[in-house]
Amino acid sequence: MPHIIHTVPRPDPQIVAALGKLGTATIHEAQGQSGALAHTIRPIFAGMKCCGPACTVKSHGGDNLMLHKAIAVAQPGDVIMHDGEDWFESNVWGEIMTTGAMARGIAGLVTSGVVRDTEAIHAKGFPVFSQGVSMKWCTKAALGTINHPIIVAGVAINPGDIIVGDDDGVVVIPLARAAEVLEKSLAREEKERVMMAQLKQGKTTVELLGLDKLLAGMGLTEE
């Protein structure tokens, strides 16, 4: 049923800010190798990064009517998460919508569809993650939902979940796990900082990770 929910649970802004300083790979591993969108969801240009609560949108493939409405519904700092039914033949987002989203303080767009006006979006510095690019025009003829649960690129997303995107892809952090995932991510970063310091001192990853024992157990011999 077409429907919009305006009031949704929201994460602690301090937790969102802290997660935004971390890489998606760190977060993904810290939360048990979960939450990563399929590799087909990519930033349209290198260097794009976004972090914020999800404003979820479900629309008919090739139709962006609900995305226009989502720009008006989303709160400053939100990342618009769009289930566009993996439609690749016509775009659902371009420069005009980017301009409107930026004016409202929206932090980025993640769509399972495709976009256009990539050079203009890049010049504006608005983070967009999509499954590709198409110049073809879309329709504004179908209703959908905003701030209801959706699935994008194989991952279930609820409104208010925290979205982090960077050059490595996009990861979803369930709202209920936000504080826990932040703590584990920071611990993982510290562990890797110590490891890299040891590597600079001449240690090897084989030593630090105890891989010789693993290799021997698998039957590897040396002479």
Image (cartoon, rainbow, N blue to C red):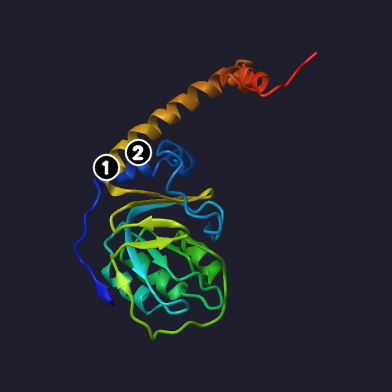
The residue sitting at 34% across, 37% down in the picture is: 182
| Residue at the limit of the structure toward the left, as seen here | 7
Classed neighbour count for the residue bearing mark 1: other residues with Cα under 10 Å, few (<14), some (14–19), many (≥20): few
Q: Is residue 134 above or below residue 121?
A: below
Classed neighbour count for the residue bearing mark 2: other residues with Cα under 10 Å, few (<14), some (14–19), many (≥20): many
- Separation (CA) of disc 2 from disc 1: 13 Å
Quadrant, the C terminus:
top right
Q: Which residue is mark 1?
A: 14
Quadrant, the N terminus:
bottom left
Query: 216 or 64: nearer the eye?
Result: 216
Q: Position of residue 30 (x, y in %)?
A: 42, 36
Query: 179 or 49: nearer the eye?
Result: 179
| Residue at the limit of the structure toward the right, as seen here | 223
Query: 158 or 96: nearer the eye?
Result: 158
Q: Is residue 73 rendered to the left or right of residue 64?
A: left
Q: Mark 2 touching mark 1, by CB under 8 A?
A: no
Disc with the residue nearer the chain's start (2 vs 1):
1
**Helix, strand or loop under label 1:** helix
Q: Which residue is mark 2?
A: 181
Q: Position of residue 144 (x, y in %)?
A: 33, 76
Residue 80 lies in quadrant: bottom left
